[in-house]
Amino acid sequence: MEILVAKHMGFCGGVKRAVEMAAGAATDAQDAVVTWGPLIHNPQVVTRLEAGGVRVAETLEEMRGETFVVSAYGVEHAVLDAARERGMTIVDATCPVVIRAHSLAFKLVEEGYQLIIVGDHGHPEMVTVKEVLGEKVTIVHTREEVAQVRLRGRIAVMSQTTQSQENFRQIVGDLSLRTKELRVVNTLCPAITVRQEEAERLVEEVDTLVIIGGHHSSNTTRLAEIGRSHGLPTHHVEVPEEIDPSWFAGVQKVGVMSGASTPEWIIADVITRLREIDAARSPVAAS
């Protein structure tokens, strides 16, 4: 069985930066280092950070310690204010691409546009924007949702940085038919887009696809959606223990991709597991 590994694997720049900043803060701090929710959407990395002294807070009451690290997706102002009130040192690990997207959203509203953002309801990146802009922004995830939005005047549309490129294109197309003035701002993360484009190519070359990354990772889920949209058997796994050897019965070529918050060590372990499965197959099964 041939294993085709994608070119773009492992941490993107924003995730790498956030992990290094959190680990560095834990090394320097004398007291607890805290994040609001997971720093990134990869449970195994979060567990390693916790072992190194980075604690995850889920409530404001748990926001106690010396240092507060803002996650790669940003954080609500209420949480930042709580950290400041407690005298915590703030380490802002928000991805620069997310910061740019947020700034553009605020600017578009200031310029008088009715703002529509294509994103996941409840994603931290969207929660932060919604907290600031409130009713001035409408978040939609599907074409069906945007069809229900009442449009008025000048419309601007942008995207959550980890959204599906194809979904964004389709929603932009739908909006263009419904309004005379539409401003389209591309806020898709280039590191995410290049992986989605690579997935579109890889699905044409393999019999099945293994996507490695957190089950709650938006960008990882997008990669799996691409595989399935082509009718390709696609398996989204966090760790090698989730892999079922039966997935590869009769498979000649398997493609391997990872989300942008997947560490190199898990990728290596998954590839090792795939090689073990291939080696264990009988000559008849492997032919």
Image: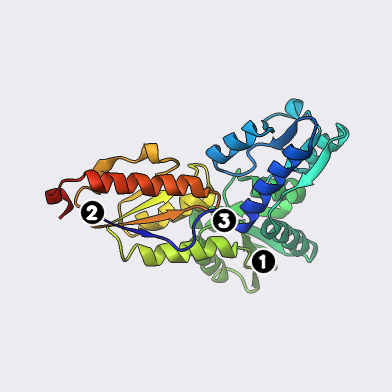
Check residue 251 in the rendering and tell me which mark sits there, or answer none.
2
Name the kind of residue labelled 1 in the image: Ile
Q: Residue furthest top?
A: 61
x and y, in percent, of residue 43 in the image: 54, 38
Q: Circle 3 is placed at which residue position? A: 162
| In the image: residue 1, left or right of residue 94 | left
In the image, residue 125 lies at what x, y percent? 65, 49
Instruction: Work out whether 79 lies above or below 100.
Output: above
Secondary structure under the numbered disc 3 in the rendered image:
loop
Q: Is residue 104 visible?
A: yes
Q: Nearer the viewer, residue 237 or 149?
A: 237
Does residue 127 appear left or right of residue 92 in this picture?
Answer: left
The disc at residue 155 is 1
Amino acid marked by disc 2? Val
Q: Nearer the viewer, mark 3 or mark 2?
A: 2
Residue drawn 37% across the image and 64% down it: 202
Distance, label 1 to label 3, CA atoms, is 22 Å
Say which element carries label 2: loop
> CA separation, marks 2 and 1?
48 Å
